[in-house]
Image (spheres, rainbow, N blue to C red):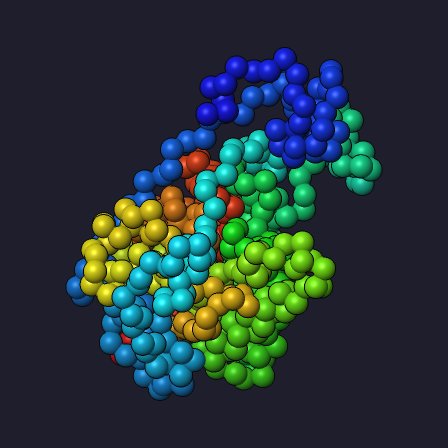
Amino acid sequence: MMSQMPQPTALSKCPSCEEPLESGDRFCGACGYDLSAVPAPPDDDPTLVVNGSGPAEGVPWPVAEAAGAGTPSATHLPTDLQGTDSGGRELPVAASPELPPTGSPVSPVTGVRFDRPPEPEEYPLQAPDPRVAQESPTPAEGVKVCVACRAGRVDHDGYCENCGHAQPRERDHMEQESGPMAAVSDRGLRHHRNEDAFAIGNAVLPDGRPAAVAIVCDGVSSATRPDDASLAASRAASASLLTALPRGTHPQQAMHEAIVAASRAVNSLAAEPATAREHAPHQNAPACTIVGTIVTSDLLVVGWVGDSRAYWVPVDRTSLPARLTEDDSWAAQMVAAGLMNEAEAYADERAHAITGWLGADAYELEPHTASFKPDRAGVVVVCTDGLWNYAEAAQEMAEAVPLDAAARPLHSAQALVGHALDGGGHDNVTVAVVPFPTPLQGAGSA
């Protein structure tokens, strides 16, 4: 490994951005990388805990409801959850997965992406670490302080005048509050850029009730411009929802239409100039996953394509939490086909290969949507796999969510990002925390 090799007397290229260096350089002139620092060896891949159990019988949890139905259906367990279209119809079970032909990044039979790149080398953390409290005094208005030494001023070129550290890009660490909810996205400890994106906002339904909207997208790293794909998808889906809900569109139908709008936005990114395709003929089209939620005073709607997830965590913690989505992944498909149990499937190196995504090279777009009527207050955690890799089971996610999440959603989102970074931060981490209010008496009952 690189960390075990003898340190050369002089570096010819920057270990971070590979820009040429001159003898005696202490910092990279392109990215500000500290050339005296030797990256620590990467941690082993985290062990994923497989959630093989759902809520116990008789324990109350959100009740699923098809779009437009007058009464909710029977209790909906996470192990029973199936993706539905906007009309509430169950999607067909996919055929047994097969391996792709040699040299092909996508299986023509199942549409599984097997072209995930190997784990990248560790990069130095350049974004603000949400685990570290900001103890330095508030800088004067208009003065930007270095995120590394927290003392030097940042010049117009984006470098610290004190330590020379290059400042993080805007997307390396993002935080936003909107009404009762909040979202945080971080580059993590391994990736050189943040390929996740989120969008949150509030709408008013025709009857005057508020509706909270949260969208989280994860760019497919092996595809071209994954960061552009996730940003385009999150913005398009959010704009679609914030337009449709005030018009009276049923939230589940609105979520379906939002995912279609996001897909179109990502597909449009594939229209590159002919010259660009000539220089990189084997690049995949931009692609990403998507998960979103709509929360009203009595209804919780989720929609997704890919392996980003939504979890339900009750405020009082007296009832069990639940995962509200089912991954479009190789492992989930193997379990659904009865070819493997969960432990076997998730132990396989192909477990996280996705079978559904947004992008021009996706074989077929199948938006999954589901609606629920919770019978108690709680929070919806919407996140990328950069978080749930460290809290896979619903109970693990609930343990990571602070007890005051409904009252302090931004603090809770920061804490969840910190949980992923403490676990290794192997991927970009994005999470939105959306409180569900205490239902009116009788809401959510059959």
Q: Quadrant of residue 241?
A: bottom right
Q: Considering only vertical position in the picture, is 9 above or below 314?
A: above
Q: Residue at x 58, y 72 (%)?
A: 264
Q: Residue at x 64, y 65 (%)?
A: 269
Q: Position of residue 435 (x, y in %)?
A: 46, 60
Does 168 sit left or right of 316 as displayed? right
In front: 54, or 24?
24
Residue ID at (78%, 26%): 161
Is there any visible trace of residue 70 in the rendered image?
yes
Of all residues, the one furthest to the left in this rendering is 57
Quadrant assignment, res 438: bottom left
Among the 4 quarters of the image, the one containing residue 55: bottom left
Measured as percent of width and height from the top left, residue 187 is found at: 56, 43
The correct choice, above or below, for 117 with respect to 327 in the image is above
Q: Does residue 165 appear in the picture of this structure?
A: no
The residue furthest top is 9
- 241 or 284, which is in the foreground? 284
Q: Does residue 263 lie above or below 391 as drawn? A: below
Pinpoint residue 375: horizontal percent, then vertical percent: 32, 68
Query: Residue 100, position in %: x, y?
Result: 37, 59
Where is the C terminus found, in terms of image quarters?
bottom left
Residue sitting nearer the eye, 247 or 290: 290
At 44% from the left edge and 54% from the top edge, which residue is drawn?
103
State whether residue 228 is above or below residue 19: below
Count the marks: how many?
0
